[in-house]
Amino acid sequence: MVPLAAVVAALAVGAVLLGVFGANPITGYRALFTGAFGGPDELAATTLKSIPLMLVGVGICIAFRTGVINIGGEGQIIMGAILATLVALALPDVPRPILVPLVMVAGAVGGGIWGAIPGALKAYSGVNEILSTIMMNIIAGFFMSFLLEDWLIEPGAIRIQQTKRLTQNADLPILPGGTRLHLGILVALIVAFLGYLLLFRSSLGLRLRAVGHNPHASRAAGMKVELSITQALAFSGACAGIAGAVLVFGSESHRLIGEGGPLAFTQSAGFNGIVTALFGGLHPLFTVLSSYLFGGMLAGGISLQRAVQVPQALVIALNGVVVVFVVGSLLLRARVQRWAEGDVQMEGRA
Amino acid sequence: MSDLFTVAIITATLASGIRLAVPFLLASLGEAVGQRAGVLNLGVEGVMLIGAYAAYYTSLESGSAAFGLLMGLVVGFAMGLVYAFITVVMHAEQGISGIGIYLFGLGFTDLLFQKQVGTPKKANKLEVKPPDWLVENTGRAGELLFSHTVLIYVAFLLVPIVYWLMTKTTFGLNVRAVGENPQAADTLGVSVNGVRTAAILFGNTMAGLAGAALALEIGFFQQNLTAGRGFIAIALVYFGAWRPVGVMSGALLFGIVSSTVVTLQVHGVISGSVSSIAHMAPAVLTVIVLVVVSRRIGQPAALTKPFTRDG
Amino acid sequence: MKPQLAFRLLFALLAVFALAAAGCGNDDDAPEAEPAAPFRVAVVAPSASNDLAFTQSMFDAVNVLVEDGQIDEFAITDGTFIVEDAGAAIRGYASEGYDLVIAHGSQYGGPLQEIAPDFPNTSFAWGTAVETFGLPNVYSYSVRSDLGGYVNGVVAAQLTDSGVIGVIGPLEVGDAKLYVDGFATGARTQNPDVDVNIVYTGSFSDVALAAEAAESHISAGADVLTGSAQMVVGATGVAQDNDVLWFGTQANQTALGEDIVVASQVYRWEVVLAQVVDQVKAGTLGGETFIMTFEGGGLDIQFNDAMSIPAAVLDSAQATIDGLSDGSISTGQ
């Protein structure tokens, strides 16, 4: 099995890195695995890490299958989180069974708008979406920074970039089982299933995929290509926006935190979600699986770092190596060849 | 506020903007050539970081910034070999590969910095500059044009060179052919994978150079030194519609707007948390300018698609 | 689209993870109840332990106590800028039986509030912060960085010839804002006509933009600069090239430019930490807040001996420190 060899090779490179730092690779990898899958608490931690990846990944499936490259997950997560936070601040007394769904919807709307803008810019003004989504990430990052420096900052002597603890009525309920796993996983699974239905079981999805497959033929067949592109990025952004809401209301802090920069809040899910979606074959349900494995790598990385006392930078580098090695392996080659034959085209408008 | 529009301040702001534009310009020129050949590299940020660290560390240890610059180019080239192997030989998905390289570069350079250098130390900067008499005898214009270090002139000199390369040479013709219609190029006897590999090597070497320019301009390295510049460079490729002059305009726009925001803060026009709003300006203006100009130029038709004979 | 293919890939990945673990066994490794009962301390911090700033100041402090023999074992998880990850690390150390877990980041309060009650026999220290959530096993600590900023400002205003001083910060929050505001107040108290220009670069890591901010300050006439956070190293380089004076904070930055760094505000967390460790050893696990000031030596202004600073200026700095300590001077914070 080639991917197996690729992962082994990646782990070997990682072992060398660990060795250079005077850490025992065996101890390290054992901590990585047990930290990710070693017990109920660890499985829960992995699941929690994977939720944003699943949500962003499902959105990426929708965009990429429509032929739109969405690099804007980071910004869409942030804007979803901001709108959801504002709703929770405005309506603290709404009962929990209503407020929790409401803030999720607010997240979807915030992220959806932040996706629809580059979508419309691409469709109607010819602005390339890679450019606009990268710029929208920057804008969203500074906007969050501004809000948490100013309007939304927690009152108090220590001015740090976070809101006050948000209303308990918006807390995502912890699922039974004694772990920290919360309702966010159900939200992610539902969104993944809806994403699957949208893409493969609805006429809208058929149109989106047709546009992704061949925009010219779709236009010739009377489809509104511009509308489809805007819709795809809006849906994609909405999924990421829900991830933003989950990151706020499912966090232990129960608040929006901007301290440490935008990546500290998004946990880079906007980028990592692209990886998991493509590993999942741009299929929402398989994206759930690949996100779970990626989540395991992230959760295990924290244990590895603690067990063998290496800098967090090593864990990030290791993630990169695993991604590069696995994607470079031959099994994917077969799939990519099929893409080249036209299953999925990532071509823009000519 | 009234003293804001003096020649001295405007000159200083423009000069600062030009310096800020250089890493964008170098990385973006390289990425544009790669994309012209049909290869998207989302890993520019990672390669820039690796180039920056290599240049910084070499300069720190050897005392020679020129040697550091060379190492920046070498590791950029080496990353190009890696990326070419992954994407051209192994046909890996370019989006994922690039993000993997970004993560690797971000983590690996931070790791090396912590292991090899530790607390920030100043390395020698690359301080080859035009002769002083040139600045002294040309007034404000001289300060704007002749006060920079050599890499800044190299970067702007590369604009016509890349233009010439892409439009007037067989290599450029082949790059464009391979990016638009690899099957046809193959039929005509062009080595699609060979040309793509060359374009990738050029692009990554330029990214390494961009990182080196960043590190050697300031003489320091820090975790995440590039602070998102690699991603902005990718965006500017689209701003410039794959053309060197367009890319340069984008880089200058971004750099000068950034330096203007800083100038406005220094002179008290913008203060406090409003600064964060002001820092959005380069990103917002880039999008707005593109909407207004609205050049509907399609991207290379075979971008992100691996080449196979039977495909 | 062949989903089986994707599934096989994922399965393969899972299999490898399982293999990797199977080769390693699965026994528990929490070392407990050793004869001398060593005192074990763990730190979780948001940036690198050698950042010459916030995290390093704590890293160095713990090492001071390790050398003094007050701490027997020391573990650190640094670079934990994601708050949820910090929560996981804090929980991990607590469950491994560390005696004192230091959550060295203001933003870690949320998780800590959830975690601390689960480990009533573990002591937690959290900073920079001024509250303990009413929990009996949480200490908090903070530092009045505005005090050192004020002193730096007083000195800077006396050393500027042009009457223009440039300040570079990351964002208008936290420790940086406290320092910058204290600095500006101090400088203006000394000389009401002095211009204190402030740039917030919007980033903790953008060294190049910090360098350009320094250039911009200098072209606006500044001959003294200061700044807070990791990215200011870029500005110190520019200051050195232009022979402009520099004032540092969070760590002694003299090494960044021996001929331009006048003084640095230094945090000596070991002063607070020693008290915390003593109290934990005596059985008091928390409930107190420590705020470092010049009194007690937790806060210090370290002048660069290689610079020839007029005696009158040094005297005024000491007078300011005394005034801030006895309450006759206020930074307005």
Image (spheres, coloured by chain):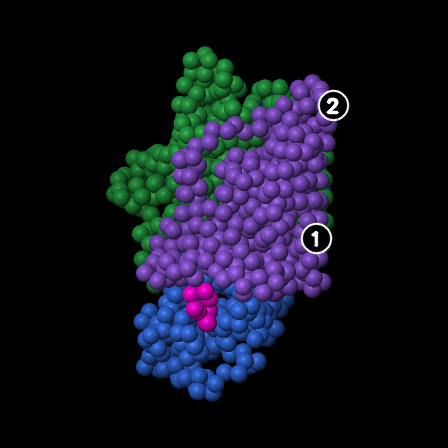
Chain colours: A green, B purple, C blue
What is the spatial separation of the Cα atoms under label 1 and label 2, in whole angstroms? 35 Å
Relative to C237, residue C328 above or below: below
The quarter in which the N terminus of chain B is drawn is: bottom left
Seen in the image, is B290 located left or right of residue C13?
Answer: left
Residues indicated by labels 1 and 2 sit on the same polypeptide chain: yes
Give residue C10's position: percent from left, percent from top: 62, 30
Q: Which residue is mark 1?
A: B71
Give the mark toward the camera: 1 or 2.
2
Quadrant of the rendered image containing residue C202: bottom left
> Which stretch did the figure color magenta?
C218-225
Q: Nearer the viewer, residue B8 or A39?
A: B8
Q: Amino acid at mark 1?
A: Met
Give residue B77's position: percent from left, percent from top: 70, 44
Disc 1 element? helix
Give residue B242's position: percent from left, percent from top: 56, 35
Which chain is indicated by disc 1? B
Name the residue located 62 percent from the left edge and 40 percent from the top edge: B162
Q: Which residue is mark 2?
A: B189
Regarding residue C127, the answer to whether it shows in the image is: no
Name the residue located 41 percent from the left edge and 30 percent from the top edge: A125
Relative to C195, residue A282 above or below: above
